[in-house]
Amino acid sequence: MTLISILGIFVFALSSSAFGNVLAPRDLEGCGGSIFVEDAVVIDAPLSANCMWQIKTDENRVLVFTVISAGGNFKQIEEFLSIHDGLGLDSSVLLFENQKVHEVSKKELPEAIYTTGSVAEVRFKKTPTSVFKLKIQKAVDCPFNLGAESQCGRVVDETSCYCATFSKRDQSSQTSYCNSHAMKLWVIESYEEELAIQTVWGTSSYFWTSGTDELSEGMWIWETTGTNLYPGYANWADAEPNDSGGYEDCLYINFSKNGRIGWNDGSCGGLWDAICEAHS
Ligand SMILES: *[C@@H]1O[C@H](CO)[C@@H](O)[C@H](O)[C@H]1NC(C)=O
Ligand SMILES: *[C@@H]1O[C@H](CO)[C@@H](O)[C@H](O)[C@H]1NC(C)=O
Protein backbone atom coordinates (compact mmCIF):
# COMPACT_ATOMS: atom_id res chain seq x y z
CA MET A 1 0.00 0.00 0.00
CA THR A 2 1.40 3.31 -1.00
CA LEU A 3 0.66 6.18 1.30
CA ILE A 4 2.63 8.65 -0.64
CA SER A 5 3.41 9.36 -4.18
CA ILE A 6 6.05 11.53 -5.56
CA LEU A 7 5.98 13.01 -8.95
CA GLY A 8 9.26 14.32 -10.09
CA ILE A 9 9.27 16.84 -12.86
CA PHE A 10 12.78 16.65 -14.10
CA VAL A 11 14.30 18.60 -16.87
CA PHE A 12 17.73 17.30 -17.64
CA ALA A 13 19.83 19.71 -19.57
CA LEU A 14 21.56 17.07 -21.62
CA SER A 15 19.36 14.05 -21.32
CA SER A 16 15.85 13.53 -22.54
CA SER A 17 15.55 10.11 -20.96
CA ALA A 18 12.00 9.13 -20.01
CA PHE A 19 13.58 7.49 -16.99
CA GLY A 20 13.98 10.93 -15.48
CA ASN A 21 10.25 11.60 -15.20
CA VAL A 22 9.34 9.69 -12.09
CA LEU A 23 11.26 9.49 -8.88
CA ALA A 24 10.51 6.38 -6.85
CA PRO A 25 10.21 7.01 -3.12
CA ARG A 26 13.08 5.42 -1.29
CA ASP A 27 10.75 3.80 1.19
CA LEU A 28 7.21 3.07 0.04
CA GLU A 29 6.07 1.58 3.32
CA GLY A 30 7.04 4.38 5.61
CA CYS A 31 6.76 7.96 4.51
CA GLY A 32 9.24 10.60 3.66
CA GLY A 33 12.65 9.97 2.24
CA SER A 34 15.48 11.69 0.43
CA ILE A 35 15.02 13.74 -2.69
CA PHE A 36 17.53 15.36 -4.99
CA VAL A 37 16.00 18.28 -6.84
CA GLU A 38 17.35 18.42 -10.35
CA ASP A 39 14.89 21.06 -11.48
CA ALA A 40 11.52 20.67 -9.77
CA VAL A 41 9.80 18.03 -7.66
CA VAL A 42 6.21 17.90 -6.40
CA ILE A 43 5.35 15.98 -3.23
CA ASP A 44 1.86 15.22 -2.00
CA ALA A 45 1.02 16.01 1.57
CA PRO A 46 1.08 12.59 3.28
CA LEU A 47 -2.01 10.96 4.73
CA SER A 48 -0.25 10.49 8.03
CA ALA A 49 1.83 12.67 10.30
CA ASN A 50 5.47 12.19 11.24
CA CYS A 51 6.79 12.12 7.71
CA MET A 52 10.13 13.66 7.05
CA TRP A 53 11.74 14.58 3.75
CA GLN A 54 15.38 15.42 3.31
CA ILE A 55 15.88 17.52 0.22
CA LYS A 56 19.03 18.48 -1.60
CA THR A 57 19.96 20.28 -4.75
CA ASP A 58 23.20 21.38 -6.43
CA GLU A 59 25.70 22.80 -3.98
CA ASN A 60 25.72 26.36 -5.24
CA ARG A 61 21.94 26.63 -5.50
CA VAL A 62 19.07 27.13 -3.07
CA LEU A 63 15.64 25.50 -2.75
CA VAL A 64 12.34 27.28 -3.20
CA PHE A 65 9.05 25.91 -1.87
CA THR A 66 5.63 26.86 -3.16
CA VAL A 67 2.23 25.40 -2.30
CA ILE A 68 0.00 23.86 -4.93
CA SER A 69 -3.69 24.12 -3.97
CA ALA A 70 -4.52 25.26 -0.40
CA GLY A 71 -4.92 28.58 -2.21
CA GLY A 72 -1.17 28.59 -2.80
CA ASN A 73 -1.02 29.92 0.71
CA PHE A 74 1.48 28.99 3.43
CA LYS A 75 -0.75 30.27 6.24
CA GLN A 76 -3.14 27.39 5.60
CA ILE A 77 -0.54 24.66 5.75
CA GLU A 78 2.01 25.83 8.29
CA GLU A 79 0.25 23.99 11.11
CA PHE A 80 0.79 20.67 9.33
CA LEU A 81 4.43 20.94 8.47
CA SER A 82 7.63 22.80 9.03
CA ILE A 83 10.30 23.58 6.45
CA HIS A 84 13.81 23.68 7.88
CA ASP A 85 16.80 25.59 6.57
CA GLY A 86 19.21 22.69 6.53
CA LEU A 87 19.27 19.16 7.90
CA GLY A 88 19.18 18.16 11.51
CA LEU A 89 17.29 18.94 14.66
CA ASP A 90 18.76 22.37 15.20
CA SER A 91 18.08 23.69 11.70
CA SER A 92 15.86 26.76 11.86
CA VAL A 93 12.26 26.76 10.69
CA LEU A 94 11.56 28.85 7.63
CA LEU A 95 8.33 30.81 7.78
CA PHE A 96 6.73 32.61 4.89
CA GLU A 97 6.22 35.76 6.93
CA ASN A 98 9.95 35.94 7.66
CA GLN A 99 11.01 35.77 4.03
CA LYS A 100 12.37 39.04 2.74
CA VAL A 101 10.81 40.00 -0.55
CA HIS A 102 12.80 42.08 -3.01
CA GLU A 103 11.26 45.46 -3.60
CA VAL A 104 11.33 44.89 -7.34
CA SER A 105 10.26 41.25 -7.41
CA LYS A 106 7.30 40.39 -9.57
CA LYS A 107 4.14 40.85 -7.54
CA GLU A 108 2.18 38.03 -9.23
CA LEU A 109 4.65 35.31 -8.25
CA PRO A 110 3.28 32.61 -5.91
CA GLU A 111 4.10 32.74 -2.19
CA ALA A 112 7.50 31.16 -1.82
CA ILE A 113 9.89 30.05 0.90
CA TYR A 114 13.62 30.07 0.14
CA THR A 115 16.41 28.25 1.91
CA THR A 116 19.80 29.86 2.40
CA GLY A 117 21.67 26.76 1.26
CA SER A 118 21.27 23.66 -0.88
CA VAL A 119 19.63 21.39 1.71
CA ALA A 120 16.32 21.41 3.57
CA GLU A 121 14.11 19.21 5.64
CA VAL A 122 10.31 19.08 5.50
CA ARG A 123 8.62 17.61 8.56
CA PHE A 124 4.93 16.78 8.48
CA LYS A 125 3.92 17.00 12.10
CA LYS A 126 0.14 16.78 11.85
CA THR A 127 -2.08 14.88 9.41
CA PRO A 128 -3.28 17.40 6.83
CA THR A 129 -7.02 17.92 6.76
CA SER A 130 -7.05 18.90 3.11
CA VAL A 131 -5.17 17.83 0.06
CA PHE A 132 -2.23 19.90 -1.05
CA LYS A 133 1.09 19.48 -2.74
CA LEU A 134 4.41 21.09 -2.15
CA LYS A 135 6.45 22.12 -5.15
CA ILE A 136 10.18 22.23 -4.60
CA GLN A 137 12.41 23.85 -7.17
CA LYS A 138 16.07 24.58 -7.61
CA ALA A 139 16.68 28.34 -7.63
CA VAL A 140 19.61 30.70 -7.80
CA ASP A 141 20.32 32.80 -4.77
CA CYS A 142 19.30 36.41 -5.34
CA PRO A 143 21.04 39.17 -3.42
CA PHE A 144 19.28 42.49 -2.84
CA ASN A 145 21.93 44.25 -4.89
CA LEU A 146 25.45 43.83 -6.23
CA GLY A 147 26.80 46.78 -4.31
CA ALA A 148 26.27 50.49 -4.82
CA GLU A 149 24.25 51.64 -7.83
CA SER A 150 22.58 48.30 -8.42
CA GLN A 151 19.36 46.51 -7.58
CA CYS A 152 18.27 42.87 -7.89
CA GLY A 153 15.00 40.98 -7.80
CA ARG A 154 13.02 37.90 -8.74
CA VAL A 155 11.68 39.86 -11.64
CA VAL A 156 10.62 37.12 -14.05
CA ASP A 157 9.97 33.96 -12.04
CA GLU A 158 10.71 32.48 -8.62
CA THR A 159 13.85 30.58 -9.59
CA SER A 160 15.86 33.16 -11.53
CA CYS A 161 17.42 36.46 -10.52
CA TYR A 162 17.98 39.71 -12.42
CA CYS A 163 20.11 42.65 -11.38
CA ALA A 164 20.31 46.11 -12.89
CA THR A 165 23.53 48.06 -12.56
CA PHE A 166 23.23 51.81 -12.86
CA SER A 167 26.95 52.36 -13.32
CA LYS A 168 27.57 53.14 -16.96
CA ARG A 169 30.25 51.01 -18.62
CA ASP A 170 31.05 49.80 -22.10
CA GLN A 171 29.54 46.50 -23.18
CA SER A 172 32.54 44.27 -22.47
CA SER A 173 33.05 45.85 -19.03
CA GLN A 174 29.40 45.12 -18.25
CA THR A 175 29.99 41.51 -19.33
CA SER A 176 32.89 41.30 -16.86
CA TYR A 177 30.85 43.02 -14.17
CA CYS A 178 28.06 40.42 -14.45
CA ASN A 179 30.54 37.53 -14.59
CA SER A 180 32.32 38.78 -11.48
CA HIS A 181 29.01 38.37 -9.64
CA ALA A 182 28.42 34.86 -11.05
CA MET A 183 25.82 36.27 -13.43
CA LYS A 184 25.61 36.80 -17.19
CA LEU A 185 24.94 39.85 -19.28
CA TRP A 186 21.32 39.78 -20.40
CA VAL A 187 19.93 37.62 -23.23
CA ILE A 188 16.43 38.83 -24.13
CA GLU A 189 14.44 35.70 -24.85
CA SER A 190 10.85 36.85 -24.98
CA TYR A 191 8.56 39.84 -24.92
CA GLU A 192 7.31 38.80 -21.45
CA GLU A 193 10.83 38.81 -20.08
CA GLU A 194 11.56 42.17 -21.68
CA LEU A 195 8.32 43.64 -20.36
CA ALA A 196 9.08 42.36 -16.85
CA ILE A 197 12.41 44.20 -16.91
CA GLN A 198 10.81 47.31 -18.33
CA THR A 199 8.17 47.27 -15.61
CA VAL A 200 10.75 47.57 -12.85
CA TRP A 201 13.71 49.33 -14.42
CA GLY A 202 12.53 50.82 -17.67
CA THR A 203 11.92 54.45 -16.88
CA SER A 204 13.96 56.32 -19.42
CA SER A 205 17.03 54.17 -19.46
CA TYR A 206 19.34 52.29 -21.76
CA PHE A 207 20.76 48.91 -20.83
CA TRP A 208 23.42 46.80 -22.47
CA THR A 209 22.48 43.27 -23.39
CA SER A 210 24.86 40.57 -24.62
CA GLY A 211 23.67 40.93 -28.23
CA THR A 212 26.44 41.65 -30.73
CA ASP A 213 27.30 41.38 -34.42
CA GLU A 214 30.93 42.32 -33.89
CA LEU A 215 32.25 39.09 -35.41
CA SER A 216 30.24 39.30 -38.59
CA GLU A 217 28.20 42.34 -39.59
CA GLY A 218 24.48 41.57 -39.51
CA MET A 219 24.93 38.15 -37.86
CA TRP A 220 23.53 38.95 -34.46
CA ILE A 221 24.35 36.57 -31.63
CA TRP A 222 23.84 36.54 -27.88
CA GLU A 223 27.40 36.41 -26.62
CA THR A 224 26.35 35.04 -23.22
CA THR A 225 24.89 31.86 -24.70
CA GLY A 226 26.61 31.82 -28.08
CA THR A 227 23.23 31.45 -29.78
CA ASN A 228 22.06 33.23 -32.89
CA LEU A 229 19.51 35.94 -32.35
CA TYR A 230 17.54 34.79 -35.43
CA PRO A 231 15.21 33.00 -35.61
CA GLY A 232 14.06 34.11 -32.24
CA TYR A 233 12.49 37.00 -30.46
CA ALA A 234 13.60 40.41 -31.73
CA ASN A 235 12.30 43.87 -31.04
CA TRP A 236 14.38 46.42 -32.92
CA ALA A 237 13.22 50.03 -32.86
CA ASP A 238 12.10 51.49 -36.20
CA ALA A 239 14.92 51.62 -38.76
CA GLU A 240 17.30 49.74 -36.45
CA PRO A 241 19.82 48.17 -36.50
CA ASN A 242 21.41 50.58 -38.95
CA ASP A 243 25.12 50.11 -38.15
CA SER A 244 25.52 53.87 -38.22
CA GLY A 245 28.99 54.78 -39.43
CA GLY A 246 29.84 51.07 -39.60
CA TYR A 247 30.72 50.82 -35.93
CA GLU A 248 27.46 49.92 -34.14
CA ASP A 249 27.96 46.28 -33.18
CA CYS A 250 26.39 45.88 -29.75
CA LEU A 251 22.75 45.70 -28.74
CA TYR A 252 21.29 47.94 -26.07
CA ILE A 253 17.67 48.35 -25.17
CA ASN A 254 16.12 51.79 -25.33
CA PHE A 255 13.24 52.07 -22.88
CA SER A 256 12.81 55.80 -23.37
CA LYS A 257 10.32 55.58 -26.19
CA ASN A 258 7.23 56.58 -24.28
CA GLY A 259 6.53 53.09 -22.95
CA ARG A 260 7.31 51.38 -26.22
CA ILE A 261 10.32 49.13 -26.01
CA GLY A 262 12.93 49.19 -28.74
CA TRP A 263 16.35 47.73 -29.40
CA ASN A 264 19.15 49.65 -30.98
CA ASP A 265 22.64 48.86 -32.15
CA GLY A 266 25.30 51.07 -30.64
CA SER A 267 29.04 51.32 -30.49
CA CYS A 268 30.27 48.61 -28.08
CA GLY A 269 32.36 51.29 -26.41
CA GLY A 270 29.26 53.32 -25.52
CA LEU A 271 28.57 53.74 -21.83
CA TRP A 272 25.22 52.37 -20.66
CA ASP A 273 23.70 50.65 -17.65
CA ALA A 274 23.25 46.88 -17.87
CA ILE A 275 21.06 43.96 -16.82
CA CYS A 276 22.70 40.83 -15.41
CA GLU A 277 20.80 37.56 -15.04
CA ALA A 278 21.25 34.18 -13.37
CA HIS A 279 19.20 31.03 -13.84
CA SER A 280 18.96 27.82 -11.91
C1 LIG B 1 21.09 55.17 -37.18
O1 LIG B 1 20.49 55.16 -35.90
C2 LIG B 1 21.03 56.15 -35.01
C3 LIG B 1 20.42 55.88 -33.66
O2 LIG B 1 21.01 54.75 -33.16
C4 LIG B 1 20.74 57.52 -35.55
O3 LIG B 1 21.27 58.50 -34.69
C5 LIG B 1 21.33 57.65 -36.93
O4 LIG B 1 20.97 58.86 -37.49
C6 LIG B 1 20.89 56.53 -37.83
N1 LIG B 1 21.70 56.57 -39.04
C7 LIG B 1 21.21 56.40 -40.23
C8 LIG B 1 22.19 56.43 -41.35
O5 LIG B 1 20.00 56.21 -40.41
C1 LIG C 1 15.71 56.16 -27.73
O1 LIG C 1 14.47 56.27 -28.40
C2 LIG C 1 14.04 57.61 -28.54
C3 LIG C 1 12.66 57.60 -29.15
O2 LIG C 1 12.70 56.99 -30.39
C4 LIG C 1 15.02 58.36 -29.41
O3 LIG C 1 14.61 59.73 -29.54
C5 LIG C 1 16.38 58.34 -28.76
O4 LIG C 1 17.34 58.93 -29.62
C6 LIG C 1 16.79 56.89 -28.49
N1 LIG C 1 18.01 56.96 -27.71
C7 LIG C 1 19.05 56.15 -27.91
C8 LIG C 1 20.25 56.41 -27.10
O5 LIG C 1 19.03 55.24 -28.73
Image (cartoon, rainbow, N blue to C red):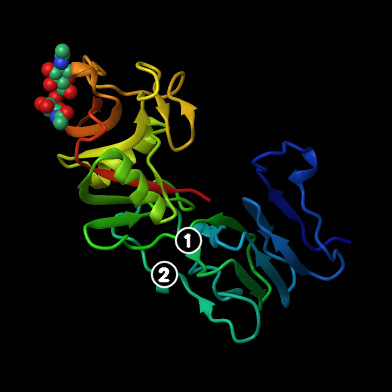
Badge 2 amino acid:
Gln
Residue marked by disc 2: 99
Badge 1 amino acid:
Ala
Ligand 1 shown in quarter? top left
Residue at left offset 45%, top offset 22%: 232
Residue at left offset 29%, top offset 55%: 104
- Real-space Cα separation, disc 1 to disc 2, in angstroms: 8 Å
Residue marked by disc 1: 112
Q: Nearer the viewer, residue 163 or 132?
A: 163
Say whether residue 263 is left or right of residue 97. Answer: left
Point out residue 144 in the picture as x, y percentages from the top left corner: 33, 63
In the figure, residue 229 lies in which quadrant? top left
- In the structure shown, which secondary structural element does the residue marked by tag 2 occupy? loop
Say whether residue 21 is left or right of residue 1. Answer: left
Tell me if I can see residue 279 in this picture.
yes
Q: Nearer the viewer, residue 89 or 52?
A: 89
Residue at left offset 55%, top offset 61%: 60
Tell me if I can see residue 68 in this picture.
no
Badge 2 crowding class, 10 Å Cα cut-off, few under 14, some 14 to 19, many 20 or more, is: few
